[in-house]
């Protein structure tokens, strides 16, 4: 999967939750990217948008998903 696309989707999801993308450092972006990528590999029938939304929501709410 294209890393730049996923990073852009992460930024857009942050905007939807009224969070600034400066709350993420480079390690957080990489972690979210790896988490989303592994989810895609586990279930290729999952919708990328939903995977990104779940990952960002987990990060913001500090849920166990993150």
Image (cartoon, rainbow, N blue to C red):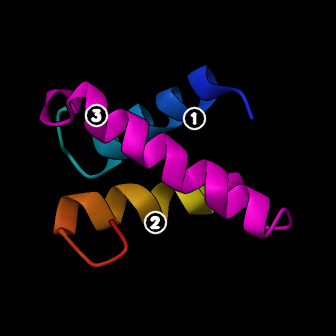
Q: Position of residue 37 (x, y in %)?
A: 64, 49
Say whether disc 1 or disc 3 marks the residue closer to the N-terminus.
1
- Decide if residue 27 is on the left or right side of residue 18: right
Give the residue number, with chain letter if any, for mark 2: 54
Residue 23: in magenta span = yes
Range of magenta residues = 21-48
When asked about the image quadrant of residue 5, the answer is: top right
Q: Residues within 10 Å of mark 1 (few under 14, many from 20)?
A: some
Q: Nearer the observer, disc 1 or disc 3?
A: 3
Where does the C terminus fall, quadrant-wise? bottom left
Say whether disc 2 or disc 1 marks the residue closer to the N-terminus.
1
Give the residue number, with chain letter if any, for mark 1: 6
Pick the front one: 15 or 31:
31
Question: Residue at 34% of width from left, 47% of height from top?
Answer: 16
Q: Main secondary structure of the magenta part?
A: helix
Give the number of the disc on residue 27: 3
Calculate the distance from the C-alpha at mark 1 to the C-alpha at mark 3.
Answer: 15 Å
Calculate the distance from the C-alpha at mark 2 to the C-alpha at mark 3.
Answer: 18 Å
Question: Residue at 47% of width from left, 58% of height from top?
Answer: 53
Q: Position of residue 45 (x, y in %)?
A: 86, 67
- Decide if residue 41 is on the left or right side of residue 5: right
What element does badge 2 sit on? helix
Question: Residue at 31% of width from left, 67% of height from top?
Answer: 58
**Location of residue 31 with respect to 21 vertically, above or below:** below
Say whether disc 2 or disc 3 marks the residue closer to the N-terminus.
3
């Amino acid at each position: 999967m294209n890393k730049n696309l996923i990073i852009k989707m992460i930024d857009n999801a942050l905007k939807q939750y009224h969070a600034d993308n400066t709350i993420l450092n480079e390690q957080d972006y990489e972690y979210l990217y790896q988490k989303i990528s592994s989810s895609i590999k586990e279930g290729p029938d999952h919708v990328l948008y939903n995977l990104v939304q779940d990952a960002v929501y987990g990060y913001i709410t500090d849920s166990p998903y993150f």
